[in-house]
Amino acid sequence: MGNVLLEFNPRNIVSHFTQDAKTINYITPMIFGHQEWLSLDLGTITDDEAILSICARVDSTFHPLVTQIVKEWPVTNYYYESMIPLVNTLKNRGMKLYLLSNASIKFHTYKKDIRALDVFDGIVISADIHKAKPDPAFYETVLTQLKLDRSECFMIDDMKANIEGAAQCGIKGTIYTGDIKALEQTLTEKGIL
């Protein structure tokens, strides 16, 4: 989902809440570069628990900003409308489409805004199964839960590690760099498009 159907750029997220460059440089890794963000994606902590943990590392002057970002960051979501035609083409070709994403439970509050999901056949997010990409256990859980044949699956992801994790489970895939034409060419070469 991130950087495929919607932008996920921590620096841009923080920049939505403050324009001070020093604050952006300081707060971005404090929120997105520590265990709390992964724990949110795994569904093992709440927003409030993440805020308490992050605030223990930063000066109290940043506590209101940390709280606001952790609680409100989805308002910054930028959805890639340009991906919708490709999604629709794949669906019209009879492909089953599934969203597999590392995302916190907060995903359920903004998923309705991702127009491309209207045609998806299923959604699995890490917080719901308490496993995250690129852990092979994530993919094995998805295969079982959705009753998929791994040899028929093809994954598109913006991170090499996630494609490699899927490959360990026998799932082919490609890294999406933001170039839709290149992605279409890859899918054509694989006989998918």
Image (spheres, helix red, strand yellow):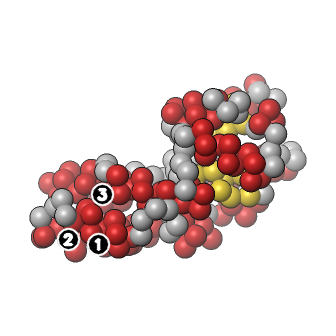
- In the rendered image, residue 27, in percent from the top left (x then y), is placed at 23, 57
Location of residue 133 by image quarter:
top right
Q: What residue does disc 2 label?
A: 63
Q: Secondary structure at mark 1?
A: helix
Element type where label 2 sits in the image: helix
137 over 126 or under it: above or below: above
Q: Quadrant of the C terminus?
A: top right
Tell me whether the residue at label 3 lies in contact with that at label 2, contact meaning CB atoms closer than 8 angstroms: no
Q: Kindly indicate whether the residue at mark 1 contacts the one at mark 2 (C-beta within 8 angstroms).
A: yes
Q: Is residue 11 left or right of residue 88?
A: left
Q: Is residue 77 above or below residue 87?
A: below
Mark 2 residue type: His
Q: Which mark is residue 67?
A: 1
Between discs 3 and 2, the one toward the N terminus: 3
Q: Which mark is residue 31?
A: 3
| Residue positioned 58% across, 70% down in the render | 108
Image location (x, y in percent) of residue 55 = 21, 66
179 or 120: which is nearer to us?
Answer: 120
153 versus 9 height, above or below? above
Q: Note whether residue 123 is visible.
A: yes
